[in-house]
Image: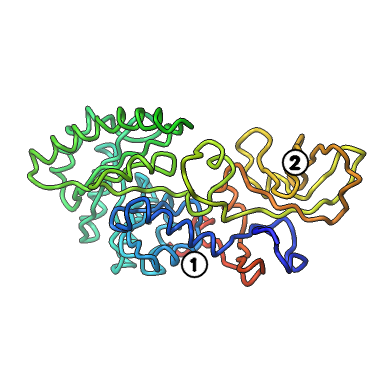
Amino acid sequence: MKWYEIKNIHSIDSPALVIYRERIINNIHLLKGMVNGDSARLRPHVKTNKISEVCKLMMDAGIAKFKCATIAEAEMLAMIGAPDVLLSYQPVGPKANRFINLVTQYPATHFSCLIDGIYAAEYLSNLSVANNLSVNVFIDLNVGMNRTGVHPSKALLLFEAVGLLPAINIVGVHAYDGHIHDTDLLLRKQTVEQAFSKVIILVEAIESISNRKLIVVAGGSPTFPIHAQRQHIECSPGTFIFWDWGYKQSLPDEPFEYAALVITRIISIVDANTITTDLGHKSVAAETPLPRVHFLNAPNAIPISQSEEHLVVKVSDSSVYKTGEVWYGVPIHICPTVALYEKATVIENNTAMEEWKVIARDRKITI
């Protein structure tokens, strides 16, 4: 059988998310190998998987530090006893209150979060004081993505201002360079180094005036091979755990394997060249133009339209296919695809074994 084929596929309704346990474990081993086995240099982002059991596999491999994007993801990690969790988000409004509740209700987990402005820092400081807590934060740096963060040239002023606030401690800086994903590794490296040079200057300045070392968290999956060469930072790739078609094509230097697929069935043969499957945009990430999925066992099928419950594709000869036939698809973008499913079916030795709940797909678990 091919690696992705499932012996008891008829027990799985479609569309469905299927994850391959052996391949997940192998991707974790590949990740560790790229930092010479030094798990202390890894802080994987769990936004891709959102599954407790997958995070446990990383913990079993010696990874103790994690990054997440939502309060639900943070709580998921705390529920399985993750020692160190960074919320890579600046909590404001009710989210700040929820973050404080996390810190209070899960004392065994060391939580931290991001800040990039004095007002958010003041609000978090006031909440911490009111709850008799001391909260650790990272300054979020804008190194070119222009989404969040303070420019490195202005971050020293923010460091000094936040340093005057009670119950809030700056322990490091966070530099996400998600805008850098050049296919050419040399060009990617040059762009990363140019962006990160500003971080180095800032960190040296802060450490000089504070007389203490900062933790530096940097990068995502595209820039991980470059940051992995640095000895004193924490790398935070996320997509590596499942990988997807988009990164497989654009980052050929990275060794990770597909470990999550969507399965779909042909539900209608429209005409001699047109087929419809049940993989609508409720079942695969739809934020990119078509195609949004590549079919491993129907590589020449070309998606031409998609609606909520249907994906229409063009083929050279529809007579070679049958209604009910299963196709195995690699999403172009796996992260938001996972969030569309309540559960993932776990495959071992080409057999569907059990289901794992995608527990952090929701905005709230208990907090």
Q: Look at label 2 and name its amino acid.
A: Ser
Tell me if 122 is positioned left or right of 335 in this view: left
Q: In the picture shown, does residue 18 fall above or below 150?
A: below
**Given this view, does label 1 or label 2 mark the residue nearer the observer?**
1
Image mark for residue 53 = 1
Tell me if 68 is positioned left or right of 114 in this view: right
Residue 84 in view: yes
What residue is rendered at 23% in x and 53% in y? 136
What residue is rendered at 7% in x and 45% in y? 211
Residue 75 picture location, percent across and down: 41, 62
Image mark for residue 215 = none
Image mark for residue 307 = 2
Name the colour scheme.
rainbow
Residue 115 picture location, percent across and down: 29, 42
Other-residue count near label 2 (Cα within 10 Å), few / some / many at <14 / 14–19 / ≥20 = few
Badge 1 element: helix
What residue is rendered at 49% in x and 38% in y? 251
Tell me if 360 is positioned left or right of 64 in this view: right
The quadrant of the rendering that contains the N terminus is bottom right
Q: Which of the marked residues, 1 or 2, is nearer the chain's N terminus?
A: 1
What residue is rendered at 15% in x and 50% in y? 166
Most extreme residue toward the front is 1
Badge 2 element: loop
Other-residue count near label 1 (Cα within 10 Å), few / some / many at <14 / 14–19 / ≥20 = some
Q: Are marks 1 and 2 in contact (CB under 8 Å)?
A: no
Q: Look at label 1 and name its amino acid.
A: Glu
Residue 96 in view: no
User: Which residue is at the front of the view, 241 or 84?
Assistant: 241
Residue 246 picture location, percent across and down: 57, 39
